Image (spheres, rainbow, N blue to C red):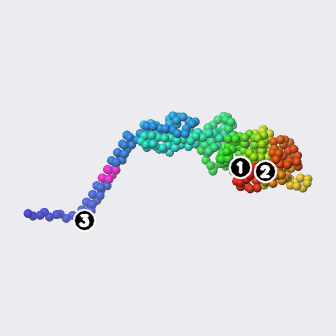
Amino acid sequence: MRRRRRKKHTPDQMEQQRRGRKVFRVLGRVLLTGIVLAAAVVAMTVFFRVKTISVEGAEQYGSEELIAGMDVQKGDNLYLWNKNRVLSDLMHSFPYLESAQLRRKLPDGLVLTVTECTAAAAVRNEDNTFTYISAGGKVLENNAADGGLPTVLGVTLNAQIGDFLATGTDAHVDAMLNVLENMDAAGLLEKMSFLNLNDLTDVRIGYDKRFDIRAGSLDDLTYRLRFAQTVISDRLSASDIGRLYWDAQNRLHFVPEAAEDVARSGTDQAGDNPVTSPAYTNPDGEVGTTDNTNGDDSTDSSSDSSDSSDNSDYSDDSDYSDDSSYDESYDDSSYDDSYDESYYDDSYYDDSYDGEG
């Protein structure tokens, strides 16, 4: 029996066969991948549907209210939506949300976790309305009244309700956020009564409706708030009302004033009470300061306290005559009946400062 001779292929024919097999393998892989993806889509569409939505951390807003405000509802696919867009829309629709997180709870649940904020201050607008903001700088709402909140002057807001105020674009906005952050960190924010930022070199902070804290610029704000808090808590009495300011030697002064004068410092009619007193030479040739709060000259001369461990300096201020609220632990026999008390922290920026009088 004669064997059939096998036909030999040319090199070109062999190359075509190899290409054909390669194309077939690629088409097979594409087809398989398509089948798998189609099966996955069908499985997600059929099986991964939202059945439960729960809310954690909400107090100002009701759970049902927040769920209704989300762009994801029961019956929607658990995966086929943009989580970042849903959360961004939610934060703008509900301004009193400070933060929001949304996580999937397999097989068919969603959990929304929120933290809420409260209004910390009311920024006065040019039309004498007020915009409430949180301590973190979120714009909360517009209102015709200040709502009993600390009022902020000197700031123009260009943000929408639900936005967080941007930093680095407006010096007055940055200053406001700086003060709010520091007051909050020091535990003083709840008692802040006003913030006057008309002049960023003469920042005025009302505290407890009793004190007009003249912080000057904001360069040393953290330190100065801490030092002022120490003096208010440990050196001044519960009946003291007045102005606190720092001189060029970083010495803190307290000048008694009426509550009306303190409140006026938080308005556009704040007056020209000096933050630091201009120097002059008295008839005895000694260098002192003058404080023209009421139009009279007064001498601010340092004196040693009877307690050598006390860093405070006390000085004469003939403008005021009520000394009933002052600490009697030091010898005031060399003073008249009025005081411009001054306090000097010679451990500048030292957290170990002992504020006991």
> Residue drawn 67% across and 43% down?
189
**Residue that numbered label 1 is attached to:** 226
Q: Upstream in the sequence, badge 2 or badge 3?
A: 3
At x 75%, y 46%, the residue is 234
Residue that appears at 85% across and 44% down: 338
x%, y% of residue 271?
A: 78, 43
Residue 104: which disc? none
Dot 1: element: helix
Residue 30 is inside the magenta segment: yes
Majority secondary structure in the magenta region = helix
**What amino acid does circle 2 point to?**
Tyr
Q: Position of residue 159 (x, y in %)?
A: 61, 43
Q: Quadrant of residue 263?
A: top right
Per the image, the residue denoted by label 3 is 11
Badge 2 crowding class, 10 Å Cα cut-off, few under 14, some 14 to 19, many 20 or more, is: many
Q: Is residue 132 above or below residue 19?
A: above
* Residue 140 visible to the viewer: yes
- Name the element at disc 2: strand
Q: Could you tell whether 164 is left or right of 236 in the image?
A: left
Task: Choose mark 2 or mark 3, whichever is in front.
Answer: 2
For the residues labelled 2 and 3, say whether their Cβ atoms are less than 8 Å apart: no
Which three-letter amino acid code belongs to the residue tagged 3?
Answer: Pro
Measure how far apart labels 2 and 3 are at the Cα level: 101 Å
Give the answer, above or below, for where 237 lies relative to 219: above
Tell me where residue 140 appears, x and y as whole percent: 61, 39
Q: Earlier in the sequence, mark 1 or mark 3?
A: 3
Q: Position of residue 249 (x, y in %)?
A: 78, 55
Task: Name the residue carrying label 2.
Answer: 343
Q: Which quadrant would the N terminus be assigned to in this image?
A: bottom left
Q: Residue furthest right?
A: 283
Residues in magenta?
27-33
